[in-house]
Amino acid sequence: MEAAASAAVAAAKETALAAAAAASAASKEAAAAAAAATEAAATVKKATVKASAAALNAKEAAAVATAAGEAAAAAAANVAAATAALQASKKRKWGSVDHISRVPDAVLGSIVSLLPTKEGARTQAISRRWRPLWLSSPLNLALDRGPNSKELITKILSEHPGPARRFSVCISQNDDKIEGWLSSPALDNLEEFELTYTFWGNNKDKLCLLPLSVFRFSPTIRVATFHGSHFPNLIAQLSLKFPCLKQLALERVTISEDVLQGMLSGCPALESLELMKVFGIDRLCISSQTLKSLRFFAGWTSQGLFLHELVIEDAPCLERLLRLDPVGTKSIKKIGGATKLAILGMLSEDISELHLGSSVFQKMIAVSLTTKMHTMRVLALRSTGPNLDAVVNFLKCFPCLERLYVIFKSWEVINNVRSYDPLDPIESLELRLKNVVLKNYDGTKSSSIDFAKFFVLNAKVLKEMKITLPYHRQHRWFAKQFSLLRVRSRASQDAQIEMRCGSHEYFTHIKGTHDLSTHDPFDLPSIGCSKCKEKGLGDAVYQI
């Protein structure tokens, strides 16, 4: 009898342990089974103690054996429950609760529509429930050029019933498939459109004619991007309306002033506009009640000039005006009615005349300072010399400026020794300016040293000054520079000044046109110094 009890106890113990192990790997039901199995194991342990103490009492041992047997049976039942739970959760991730199965199909469909095209289509293989989701979700079709890409696009458009959320393709100039794709019912009610024609060089005569069928999406489109296209002049006669369009980007396209002005006048909800190397526009006048961000490339090539003159006539919501590659064109002529403008650059001497409200600058030199723009927080300048007097006048125009970027153009040597008159205070230096970034700093010239020293001596709330050289220098050279900038009478004792060697840098690839959450689009990492990298020094930074 005692042997039978021991055997029963051992069997019950093994069964309980198996139940606990199985239950810990299951879902909520399995977890409950594990708790029950643990309780059964405790009962068995107690029964074991009782059985050992009552070895001479067969009657008591038999009772204990009976209790142990019942516990073993209970444990076996719990094991069966745990096994059933495991089998029921085959679709669940091991060791976690299957929350995805509880998500409604509508929500899962929204998730699928946000996945890349191939990954979204592959969700059909997950399970029976997932199989119809991709076809019933808004289509997200975004494919670059690649093997069989055209056949894949055609196949997807023939199988998916629509509607479409996004259509983004990159095709060759002579591709004849685009017309068929654009007419597909799967693209009905399209919200995001991007068409890129592969285009090499700057020959505007080789740009592809944009199919007029693109504009069938005008009632629903929210985001539109065009690369390497020629906009036919016929568009101006269509009086197109884009009631939902919020983001428009044109890059390496030809478009007449009449066509572009007509398109912009038909965009009552436009928030961000990007014009990068747009041929055919000499002058553009912006008047928009909704535009928040404008980024454009102002320059020239052998094929012609990009946007010779820009006039901001009335843009009460405009927050950022980003001008790239400021060489060889006066571009910005007037900024008026931009009562929320907070980020501006690059300004340079290439702008022959600039009107900021009623203030007038000619080649960066202030002719009249009658308007103060209190909304300006970030300013980027490209200054020859650099010219401290010109920069200080911009500080007077923008009294609430917090971040100043200056790219040095050291072709001339300018006397930048300037005394600061406390009786004629500059509000930004007294209360606002916290960050100063100097790029292409030439520490061999007194004009550069005096320029930097002016802010060290007079910016009272300065937190950080970053100085980047356009060349490589040794540690000894930096030590000498620091001796020139390490002044006891610095205005802000807490300011950190760092200097690094690097290469010529210009703000030609800044982002943040459409992403308005980017606090400062000019706040970019340094390119670094190639020689430092060759020597394994990494990005060496020296601090004062």
Image: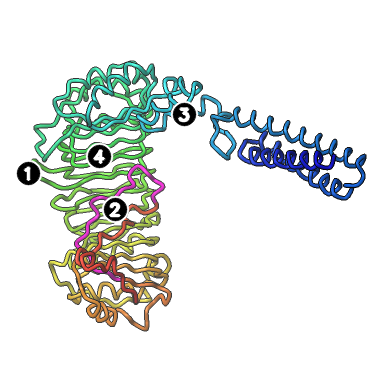
Task: Name the residue at 37% across, 79% down.
Answer: 490
Report how far apart the C-alphas of labels 1 and 4 lie in the structure.
Answer: 25 Å
Q: Is residue 314 above or below residue 138?
A: below
Q: Which tag, 3 or 2, sits closer to the chain's start?
A: 3
**Residue that carries the numbered disc 4 in the rendered image:** 285
Q: Specify the label residue 327 is tagged with.
A: none
**Residue that carries the numbered disc 3 in the rendered image:** 110
Element under disc 1:
loop
- Residue 102: image location, x then y, percent: 58, 29
Q: Is residue 151 left or right of residue 328?
A: right
Return the residue found at the far left.
302
Camera-nearest label, 3 or 4: 3
Task: Name the residue at 70% across, 38% down.
Answer: 15
Marks 3,4: beta carbons within 8 A: no
**Residue that carries the numbered disc 1 in the rendered image:** 302
Q: Which tag, 3 or 4, sits closer to the chain's start?
A: 3
Q: Tell me the crowding category of disc 1: few under 14, some 14 to 19, or many 20 or more residues within 10 angstroms, Cα based.
A: few
User: Residue 449, can we see it?
Assistant: yes
Q: Is residue 15 left or right of residue 184?
A: right
Residue segment shown in magenta: 499-518
Q: The C terminus appears in which quarter of the rendering? A: bottom left
Q: Is residue 356 left or right of residue 377?
A: left
**Residue that carries the numbered disc 2 in the rendered image:** 356
Q: Which tag, 4 or 2, sits closer to the chain's start?
A: 4
- Residue in the foreground of this view, choosing between 113 and 119: 119
Q: Is residue 154 magenta?
A: no
